[in-house]
Amino acid sequence: MRKQITTKNRAKAIAPYSPAILADGPTVYISGQIPVNPETGEFQRGSFREQAKVAFNNVGALLEAAGTSWEHAVKVGIFLADLKNFAEMNEIYKEYLTEPYPARTTIQAVLPPNVAIEVDCIAVILQKQAPNLIIGSGEIISENEIKL
């Protein structure tokens, strides 16, 4: 569950994010994902939009493996190599997230060469959706992705 927290005693949001989110339930913490094609393991070259969609899809795949989705994201971190991409990133962001938007931080960062964006996320796992997680070799993996 996620609930937006706001007050009249603050400036109105200028982008798609909530000033604060109250989360209830177990959470998953997704490390920063860059635009690496999961099929080839290769860096996704191309436009900012192409790179951003791969990074957001990579986070989405990990959310799904944990038994949740973008719908239950409570905090998103966006790292941009160039803040000139901020407006385009907001448009792409709204393709993956809906109101009430998660809390969010967006910063300009030094990323690996030719990487335009990195995305991380914290999401709630609803009890009724939580998969049976297996701990093995120091990893928590979903039962659908057991690695030998």
Image (tube, helix red, strand yellow):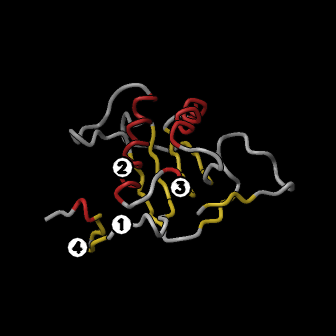
Q: Tell whether 68 sits left or right of 133.
A: right
Residue density around tag 3, few if under 14, some if 14–19, many if 20 or more, within 10 Å = many
Which residue is pictured at 57% across the width and 38% down the height?
94
Point 42% across, 25% down: residue: 47
Earlier sequence position, callout 2 versus callout 3:
2
Real-space CA distance between mark 2 and mark 4, rounded to the nearest whole angstrom: 20 Å
- In contact (CB < 8 Å): disc 2 and disc 1: no
Q: Amino acid at mark 3?
A: Ala
Q: Earlier in the sequence, mark 3 or mark 1?
A: 3
Q: Which mark is residue 131?
A: 1
Label 2 vs label 1, nearer the camera: 1
**Side of 6 where 75 appears, left or right:** left
* Distance CA(mark 2)–CA(mark 3): 13 Å
Task: Give the quarter of the figure containing the C terminus.
Answer: bottom left
- Report how far apart the C-alphas of labels 2 and 1 lie in the structure: 14 Å
Per the image, the residue denoted by label 3 is 73
Question: What secondary structure is found at the residue carrying circle 3?
Answer: strand
Label 3–label 4 contact, CB within 8 A: no
Pointer 2 with pointer 4, Cβ within 8 A: no
Q: Residue furthest right?
A: 9
Mark 4 — residue?
136
Q: Which mark is residue 24?
A: none
Left or right position of 122 against 142: right
State the separation of the CA atoms marked 3 and 4. Answer: 26 Å
